[in-house]
Image (cartoon, rainbow, N blue to C red):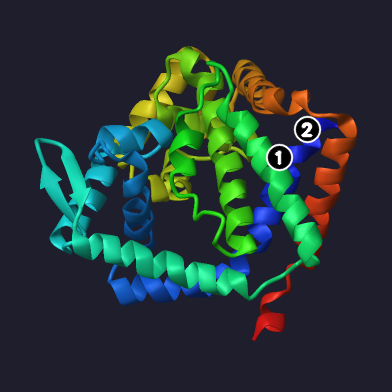
Amino acid sequence: MDLKDLYPAIEAASLAISPICEPVIEKKCDELGLSRQETFILIAVPTFEPEPVSVKLLNVRSPYTSPDHYRKLLDNLSVKGMLQPVGLEGYRLTQRGLEGIKIFLNALYVTLSGIQPLPVTQMMDLASRLKDFADACLQAPDPPGTWCIRHSRRLDPGIRAPMMARIDQFFDEFRAYRDDAHLAAWRGYEVNGHAWDILTHLWAGPEATPEMLNQALGRRGNSMEETLYAVDELIIKGWVNRETDKLRITAFGREIRKTAEDTTDRYFLMPFRGFQQNEMERALELIDDYRQGIPRLSETR
């Protein structure tokens, strides 16, 4: 087997559950009076304790998002009574915010408890293997470090949670560790997160105008001015060129981005090299069977 098959298998299995969870997420966001982004920021707050959440901490995990956008989300949560300001930049959960998190997560756990993609013994086997893998990732050296996965582990629902919720948590932890690996892979290039995000977009897709990039990456909350500044940074580095109003990744830029992706894979896969090949093959088989066993949305109604 090729270890590079592992993360795509994890990602596919995690995405397979999304159509079932999406209606629950949408409903609970509406009930809480929060946008989707506000809800996910709220749920992340406990992962930073005992530190108060701040724009700076949020930008560690996702430096691609505008600090001003994070600041707006935190301010909104404060206005809605979910957070309270502390000090100059920090926020802490209010009782209302804590109750909101419990309501949201409990609704997800109830939904997940009604799904069983595999026989119970295989579900237990998969959960056990995933925990062993996640624990190995938590012992990773620096680079890549374990900042993201350590914070993700703080949302662990515990052994009494439904097996599906535990498996979903481990998938979240692997995605977090992948973030650790990717952040470590490109942080040495001395480029800001928005510029790196633009480079990735051009690497994965066709040419684009600055306006198209700003729209495609709109969820990050960066202004058009910030996008133009990031584009200029990429052009100066020789990673992107501009012809009339179209931007294209250069051969040098493509090499830089490919090298970072290869480094990401190398960092991410380091902890898994300590497991026997037959263990990895069995885990991949279980992950694939799990994905295929998840019912389609129409089958859950």
Q: Is residue 1 visible?
A: no
Left-right relation of 100 to 247:
left
Residue 117 placement (x, y as % from top left): 75, 67
Q: Residue beneath label 1, please?
A: 7
Which SS class for mark 2?
A: helix
Residue 255 placement (x, y as % from top left): 66, 18
Which residue ends up furthest to the bottom in the rendered image? 301
Q: Quadrant of residue 112?
A: bottom right
Residue at x 85% of width, y 29% of height: 276
Left-right relation of 31 to 202:
left
The quadrant of the image that shows the N terminus is: top right
Contact between marks 1 and 2 (CB within 8 A): the answer is: yes
How busy is the neighbourhood of tag 2: few (under 14 within 10 Å), some, or many (20 plus)?
few
Which SS class for mark 1?
A: helix
Q: CA distance from mark 1 to mark 2?
A: 7 Å
Residue at x 46% of width, y 21% of height: 234
Residue at x 44% of width, y 69% of height: 106
Which residue ends up furthest to the front in the rendered image? 160
Q: Residue beneath label 2, please?
A: 4
